[in-house]
Image (cartoon, rainbow, N blue to C red):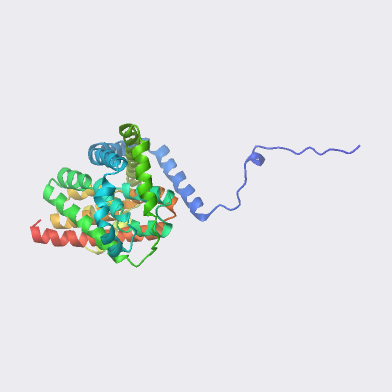
């Protein structure tokens, strides 16, 4: 008789082994473990951070973002905005070397704000209306903040000046146009699938029996995702501040003449734009300085907006390094325009 060998089965042998773990995943895992350890070590700090982030989201972001998300979704389903932007198809194509649909996404992005532009780019890539090259192209001028956040939240609520809000918004829009022109020779693809877009709009108009319910559901989900990112960003910022991890960056900015408050506000804004804007509005410095930096932060969007947008844009195979770089150039262009407008209008 043949003897049968019995293999010992352990718990660890049942766990699937992955020898091809990337360095990015290892670094991300270490960072997550570090944040979890900080939450365990200082629960009160973390609870207050999340609460503070959700308060900012509820008071400043939710009132400005949600109504526009809901109403623009309704207009999209009713096929109205596509008709409105039809006159700009040729202009956009010549200016930016972009497909016809770019004028439609650009208008909705300006009206609605982050991360609507990125979300729409992802959706139309899924439908086959735009290619991967065109998705990268559209990111250069179709990923913007909206008027209610810039004018209402940052200008009126934080800086206590609607005038500053309008200057910031105008600079932001003009900056996005200049940014599109700056990258007009990048990711050129002359493919046009506009017929699919028109057919899709017709289908949605006929198919959607309950436009209100569908628009409400989609808007609530999107705005909750934004709130989650803001809360997490506030948590990370407060942990880093508590552990003095921003100190080297603050010292670097001091070399360029920034004081401790301005350095801290700028760095916090690079992580999360709402947090940075609040801190900038509280600094006792000339408004032209704090407004210009706020303009850069809004144009750049902060890492929080970058992560929100990336969660959509990855589905369209957008080059995230290129997206991050062109958001930086958008911030620089917007800040320069803001500085000039503040000089002209005496801010």
Q: Residue at x 36, y 60 (%)?
A: 137
**Front residue of 131 and 269:** 131
Q: Which quarter of the picture shows residue 257?
A: bottom left
Q: Quadrant of the N terminus?
A: top right
Q: Position of residue 179 (x, y in %)?
A: 28, 62
**Front residue of 285 and 317:** 317
Q: Residue at x 61, y 52 (%)?
A: 19
Look at the image and tell me whether residue 221 can be seen: no
Q: Quadrant of the C terminus?
A: bottom left
Number of numbered labels in the structure image? 0
Look at the image and tell me whether residue 120 can be seen: yes
Residue 288 falls left or right of residue 241: left
Q: Residue at x 14, y 57 (%)?
A: 288
Q: Position of residue 238 (x, y in %)?
A: 32, 44
Q: Answer above or below: position of 242 versus 324.
A: above
Q: Position of residue 309 (x, y in %)?
A: 36, 49
**Front residue of 99 and 150:** 99
């Amino acid at each position: 008789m043949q003897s049968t060998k019995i293999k010992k089965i352990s718990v660890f042998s049942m766990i699937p082994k992955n020898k091809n773990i990337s360095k990015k995943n290892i670094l991300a895992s270490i960072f997550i473990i570090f944040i979890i350890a900080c939450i365990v070590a200082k629960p009160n700090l973390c609870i207050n951070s999340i609460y503070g982030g959700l308060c900012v989201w509820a008071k400043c972001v939710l009132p400005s973002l949600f109504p526009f998300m809901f109403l623009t979704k309704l207009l999209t389903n009713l096929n109205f905005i596509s008709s409105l932007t039809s006159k700009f198809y040729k202009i956009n194509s010549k200016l930016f070397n972009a497909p016809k649909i770019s004028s439609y996404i650009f208008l909705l992005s300006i009206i609605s704000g982050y991360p609507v532009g990125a979300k729409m780019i992802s959706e139309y890539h899924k439908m086959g209306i735009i290619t991967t090259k065109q998705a990268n192209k559209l990111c250069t001028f179709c990923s913007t903040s909206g008027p209610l956040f810039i004018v209402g939240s940052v200008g009126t609520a934080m800086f206590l000046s609607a005038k500053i809000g309008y200057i910031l918004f105008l600079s932001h829009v003009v900056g996005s146009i200049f940014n599109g022109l700056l990258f007009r020779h990048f990711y050129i693809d002359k493919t046009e699938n506009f017929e699919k877009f028109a057919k899709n709009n017709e289908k949605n108009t006929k198919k959607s029996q309950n436009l209100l319910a569908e628009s409400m559901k989609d808007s609530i989900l999107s705005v909750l995702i934004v709130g989650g990112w803001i809360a997490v960003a506030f948590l990370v910022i407060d942990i880093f501040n508590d552990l003095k991890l921003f100190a080297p960056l603050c010292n670097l900015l001091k070399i360029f003449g920034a004081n401790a408050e301005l350095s801290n506000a700028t760095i916090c804004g690079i992580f999360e734009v709402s947090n940075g804007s609040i801190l900038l509005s509280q600094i006792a410095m000339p408004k032209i300085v704090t407004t210009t930096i706020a303009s850069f932060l809004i144009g750049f969007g902060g890492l929080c907006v970058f992560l929100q947008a990336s969660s959509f844009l990855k589905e369209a195979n957008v080059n995230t390094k290129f997206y991050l770089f062109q958001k930086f150039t958008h911030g620089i262009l917007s800040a320069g325009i803001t500085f000039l407008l503040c000089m002209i209008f005496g801010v």
